[in-house]
Amino acid sequence: MSENTQTMMVYASFWNKMPSFRLVPLSADAPFNEGIYDPGTGTFALISKEANEKPHLLDRLDDKGFSIPIRNMKDEQGNSMTSKQRVVIDTFYEYYLQNQADIAALLEVVAVNPGHPAIEAAFVFNARMSAPISNVGTEPAPEVVTNLDAIETTTHTLPPVAGHADGSGIEQPTEK
């Protein structure tokens, strides 16, 4: 790596329709392939330039590039299952930062424009999304009564319903 570690650039973008920022390399000696900030979770993902071989289980493909189904085998949803094969693929290392101070410190080291306005906009958006919901009013919450004897009770009686002899409101059958 060169003496100048600021070999990446921050630019504004959107992630799931939310304001975000990304990091892109400006030269071949940049330490990362890409950086993406997810404002929904507050996570900054960095994709390294270093890779290692990892086995992955992938669908086995026919000569036309379609998955090969396994006859008479269905999964829990009733979909036909496909034949799998283990393939060794070069996989890039991924790093995840979730502390805004750590993200800002890293950007100061690797970015040529660490003060880009998209960074602050994404951080503010994340702070609004993760803020706890507060009480709407300014009045204090009502007291919870634990002593039921302290509650005053009153009894109300309803006046009799007009037209009914007993005042019940229910018509009584009459004999003919």
Image (cartoon, rainbow, N blue to C red):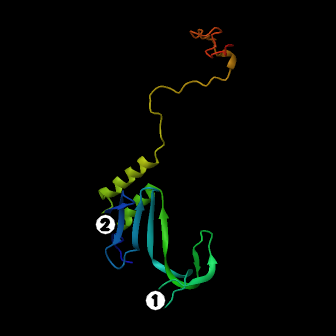
Q: Position of residue 111 (x, y in %)?
A: 34, 66
Label 2 to label 1: alpha-carbon separation: 46 Å
Which quadrant does the N terminus fall into? bottom left
Q: Looking at the image, can residue 90 be seen?
A: yes
Q: Looking at the image, can residue 83 be seen?
A: no
Callout 2 environment at 10 Å: few (<14), some (14 to 19), or many (20+)? some
**Amino acid type assigned to the residue bearing label 1 in the image:** Lys
Q: In the picture provided, is 171 more to the left or to the right than 110?
A: right
Could you tell me which residue is drawn at 63 percent across and 69 percent down?
Answer: 76
Instruction: Residue 112: give its label.
Output: 2
Query: Going by the picture, which residue comes out furthest to the front?
Result: 176
User: Could you say which is closer to the camera, residue 62 or residue 46?
Assistant: 62
Check the image and report above or below for 33 versus 87. above
Identify the element where label 1 is drawn.
loop
Could you tell me which residue is drawn at 41 percent across and 61 percent down?
Answer: 37
Check the image and report above or below for 45 versus 49. above
Instruction: Residue 64: give its label.
Output: 1
**Amino acid type assigned to the residue bearing label 2 in the image:** Val
User: Could you say which is closer to the camera, residue 74 or residue 38?
Assistant: 74
Q: In the picture provided, is 26 more to the left or to the right than 80?
A: left
Q: Position of residue 26 (x, y in %)?
A: 31, 74
User: Could you say which is closer to the camera, residue 41 or residue 160?
Assistant: 160
Q: Position of residue 151 (x, y in %)?
A: 64, 16
Dot 2 or dot 1, earlier in sequence: 1
Which quadrant does the C terminus fall into? top right
Question: Do the CB atoms of the residues marked 2 and 1 lie less than 8 Å apart?
Answer: no
Could you tell me which residue is drawn at 47 percent across and 79 percent down?
Answer: 50
Q: Position of residue 138 (x, y in %)?
A: 44, 28
